[in-house]
Amino acid sequence: MFYFSGGPIFGLMLIAFIATVAWSSIKMVPQGYDYTVERFGKYTRTLPPGLHFLFPVVERVGARMNKKEQVLDIPSQDIITRDNAMVGVDGVTFYQILNAARAAYEVEALERSIINLTMTNIRTVMGSMDLDELLSNRDIINAKLLKVVDSATEAWGVKVTRIEIKDIAPPHDLVDSMGRQMKAERDKRAQILEAEGLRQAAILKAEGEKQAVVLDAEGRREAAFKDAEARERQAKAEAEATRMVSDAIATGNIQAINYFVANNYVKALESLAKAPNQKVILMPLEAASVIGSIAGLAEITGDAFNRNKSGGHVEGGSTGRGGRSSVPHQEHAARGTPNPFGSGGQQG
């Protein structure tokens, strides 16, 4: 009775055991992972992504290793630089497992080992540099750390792809000193730029003044040339007029002498009238003398015009109207004043 009642239960149990063993022997490895296989606790092979079968009871999965690139935060730590400045430094490390078996069996606690190794090399590399180098050469620091840490983790089947220093925090008093230094440096550059600007402005101003002096000198030279040319022409004209008067005197034309003297007489009066320091002019001459002089000029001009028109020549002075001498001569003779036209009397 017991045999027949326990037979179906045993059969079900056997079927369940066989199914469990068969299911446990089937392993599905996802993409980006590698599984290690152990037989009786010893590593035998690595399963890549895909479907795999294991021997039941004999083989089992030892470690599931993520082969994707991963990132680790490096905790902040205090570092003393070569010039005895203490700074706080933290960073990040990117790594990737290339050999799952080495990463699983060559090192204990892989991530913690990478963090400690990175922190130690940060102190070594950055401690051998000055503070100014730390603040301005982060790329060099990252390259040195990457080279050292990657060579150390190669035995673990791990590739360190990148190490970045996130923050370098100097002490507050040092930050204040750096701020004052930066301000002084900027003030220095500002003063240098201002001095350069003033220098350039002075140079440009001097060049402008020099150019103005040159142009002024050239203008004065040109004006002097023009003035000399004008004086030369005026001198030639005066010489020509003097020559003509001399020729007239040489031929015995007394009217030319009268004209020359009367012209200079009128010009002398004009100069006296235009003088800026003269307000009242007292002339020891009578108005009739001046009028007579002007009339004499008119008579000389009319006589010359008539003589040029008729083509004839009258010797001596002009007979005037009715064969009398000029009015200025008579008036000056009557008043007892000198005649500006000379001593010529009546002409026959």
Image (cartoon, helix red, strand yellow):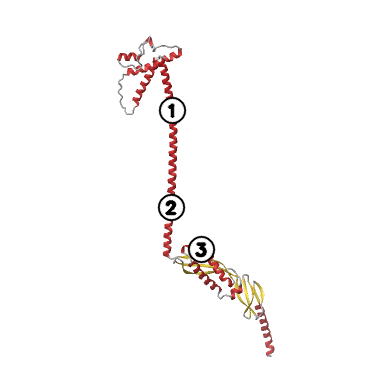
Determine whether, in the image, residue 290 is placed left or right of residue 228. Answer: left
Residue 209: % across, % down:
43, 41
* Mark carried by residue 230: 1
- Few, some or many residues within 10 Å of mark 3 (<14, 14–19, 20+): some
Give the residue at mark 2: 192
Residue 54 at x, y percent in the picture? 66, 77
Residue 138: mark in rendering: 3
Residue 63 showing in the rendered view:
yes
Residue 45 occupies quadrant: bottom right
Image quarter hosting the N terminus: bottom right
Give the answer, above or below, for where 335 lies relative to 112.
above
The reply, left or right, for residue 329 in relation to residue 211 is left
Indicate which disc, 2 or 1, sits on the residue closer to the N terminus. 2
Residue 297 at least partly seen:
no
SS class, disc 1 = helix
For label 2, the SS is helix
Q: Observer-nearest residue: 35 or 154? A: 154
Where is residue 162 shown, x and y percent of the image? 55, 66
Which corner quadrant holds the C terminus?
Answer: top left
- Crowding near the residue tagged with mark 1, few <14, some 14–19, many ≥20 C-alpha atoms within 10 Å: few
